[in-house]
Image (cartoon, rainbow, N blue to C red):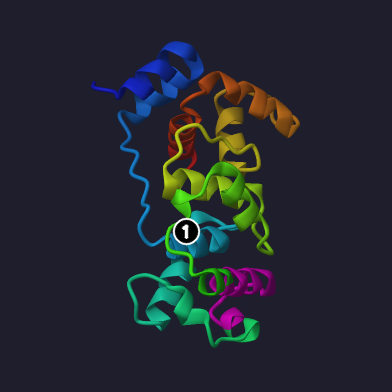
Amino acid sequence: MKFSKKEEFLRQIDPKLKKIIDKNGHLIFKPNRQNQFDTLVGIVISQFISTKAANSIFTNIRESFNSEYLYPIHFQNMSVNRIKKLGLSSNKAKTIKEISDLYLKQNIKDLSVLNDKQLNQTLLSVFGIGPWSLNMFEIFCIGKLDVFSSKDAGLRQAMNNFGMIKPDSNWELYDKYASKWSPYKSIASLHLWKTVD
C-alpha cells in the first residue's frame, strides 16, 4: 500500500497511529481555500452536534437560499432571529450574523493571506468562534499541516479507543501525546477522525 511521505513519517514515529493508518489506507488531504465564508458557517453549524446532523442543517440552509455555497450577502439583511429560524440555536445564529458583518465591513476576500496572529485576532474576535473553530478552519480551509485540537471530542474518543490516552484524562495529556506527530498533526487528526466517523 502506498502512503504519502507525511503518513510514512507518522507510521515510523508512533506504532499506535501506524495501526490506524494501515487500516485506513492513504487519505487524501484536500483543504478547500475557496468559499471560506461557506466553510466557516459549516464549522459553526457543526459545533457540539454530530456530523450527520450538521450536514443536514447545512444542506437545508444552502437550499433555502437556492445556492451551492453561502455568502455574507445572504445574511446581510437578516436578523439573528430570522437566521435562527433556519434551524440554528440563538448562539449559532448570532455567530453567523457576526461573521457575515465582519466579511462585509472589512471586505474580506481571503483569510489565508493573514499571518497566524492576524488570523487568530480576526476569527477569535467573533462571538462563538473559539480555538476549536479556528483549528478546524486552519485544517480544512487553509490546509495547515500541524494542527491538533484537544477540544475535539472525536479526536479524544479515537485516542482513547486506541489506547493512546486513558479516557477522562485532562486535555493537556492529549496535546502532549499529539506533540510527537509534529509537523504533521493535521494528517494524524484526519486518520483519527476516520476511525470515529
At x 68% / y 75%, what residue is drawn?
Answer: 90
Helix, strand or loop under label 1: helix
* Figure disc tally: 1
- As rendered, which of 119 and 157 lies closer to the eye? 119
At x 47% / y 21%, what residue is drawn?
Answer: 17
Residue that lies at the very extreme toward the left in this rendered image: 1
Picture quadrant of residue 71: bottom left
At x 55% / y 33%, what residue is drawn?
Answer: 158
Q: Quadrant of the N terminus?
A: top left
Which residues make up the magenta segment? 83-101
Amino acid type of the residue that numbered disc 1 sits on in the rendered structure? Lys
Residue 164, placed above or below residue 154 = above
Residue 73, placed above or below residue 15 = below
Asked whether residue 27 is in view, the answer is yes
Residue 78, placed above or below residue 19 = below
Question: Which residue lies under the disc numbered 1?
Answer: 52
Magenta stretch, main secondary structure class: helix
Residue 196, x across and y down, in percent: 49, 40
Picture quadrant of residue 157: top right
